[in-house]
Amino acid sequence: MPDFSVFDLVPITQGSTPEIALDHALELAQKAEGWGYKRYWVAEHHNIPGIASAATSVIIGYIAGGTKTIRVGAGGVMLPNHAPLLIAEQFGTLETLYPGRIDLGLGRAPGADRQTMRALRREPMDSDQFPQDVLELQQLLGPANPGYPVKAVPGMGTHVPIWILGSSLYGAQLAAQLGLPYSFAAHFAPKLLLEALAVYRAHFQPSDKLKKPHAMACVNVIAAETDAEARKLFTSTQQSITNIIRGKRSQLPCPIDDIESYWTPPEKVHTQDWLARSFVGSAETVKKGLKEFIEETKVEEVMVNSAIYDHPARLRSYEILSGAIRDLEALSPKLSMAGNPKV
């Protein structure tokens, strides 16, 4: 039985504000801690009106400071946007403040369009340095090395756990080569999920960080009292993806009764491909889908994204899911949500 965790883009809903989105994020993290979720991750995105998680390390500190036990981290930091030294200092500081609770997931994509990349003073070719930057970051977070002229303070010796994130085979190959845990973004790029997991496991090289492969997959879960209610809540996500296809990013829209009236047939196909790894419905429906997903992928962890317009309904979705997880655990009595404490 895998661990379950929360992935939060800190969505700004239509008519709301970043302040409200951040308040909701903290409440969700506190509730998730009580419901037994292992991690709470936020992701770096820039220049998107519906996402409030751009200053990722700041939000991690805010969430970690308002919780007690749940691991808090980045899912992830887009490393091409930053100097490794700055990330080592930021996450070394977080680990110093909240020891044993900080995760650092690293992505190769910029998390922004070309205009925003220019505003970040980044170039598209910066991503080519990703493997070297990961190695440099490991060095900066590792033990003191007299031969290394630059030290991250705080950071040096904190050994913040590093994950490689991906939505293609590239990240799977790099995570395997470096012997690091791997997380696949199946919530928006599901097509290569199984192939990426196979590549990661087949080519994994044990390291001092990890002796055997440890894979996570992020999926969408929308749970409600009934299948019909969950399907309506899911129309917010479906509208958002359709808007991205149209080249228009916006705040998270309110749900609608008839999604068929919103998209064209080609948009529907594209959106459904994008959201193919989504589990939407009542507790029983979601439980059945996740059980099949776990059997199919054999992942060690499942991270859950739930973009729901109504905040109480979002909290309720994660609460319903926590009950479904306990039911799944009952089918595997020797395993629990505590999972592998080494990762």
Image (cartoon, rainbow, N blue to C red):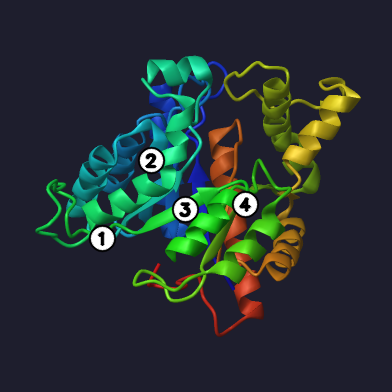
Q: Secondary structure at mark 2?
A: helix
Residue depth check, mark 4 versus mark 2: number of the one nearer the observer: 4
- Measure the C-alpha gap from mark 4 to mark 2: 33 Å
Residue position for label 2: 26
- Measure the C-alpha gap from mark 4 to mark 1: 26 Å
Give the residue type that dot 1 points to: His
Which image quadrant: the N terminus?
A: bottom right
Give the residue type that dot 4 points to: Leu
Residue depth check, mark 4 versus mark 1: number of the one nearer the observer: 4
Q: Where does the image place residue 171, in percent across and percent down from the top left?
A: 54, 51
Residue farthest bottom in this picture: 334
Residue farthest front in this picture: 147
Residue position for label 4: 169
Q: Residue 116 vs residue 196: left or right?
A: left
Residue position for label 1: 159
Residue depth check, mark 3 versus mark 2: number of the one nearer the observer: 3
Looking at this view, is 148 or 98 the one in front?
148
Which is more N-terminal, label 1 or label 3? 1
The reply to whether dot 4 and dot 1 touch (C-beta < 8 Å) is: no
Which is more N-terminal, label 4 or label 3? 3
Residue position for label 3: 164
Residue for point 31% across, 38% down: 57
Q: Residue 83 vs residue 256: left or right?
A: left
Residue for point 62% across, 78% down: 330
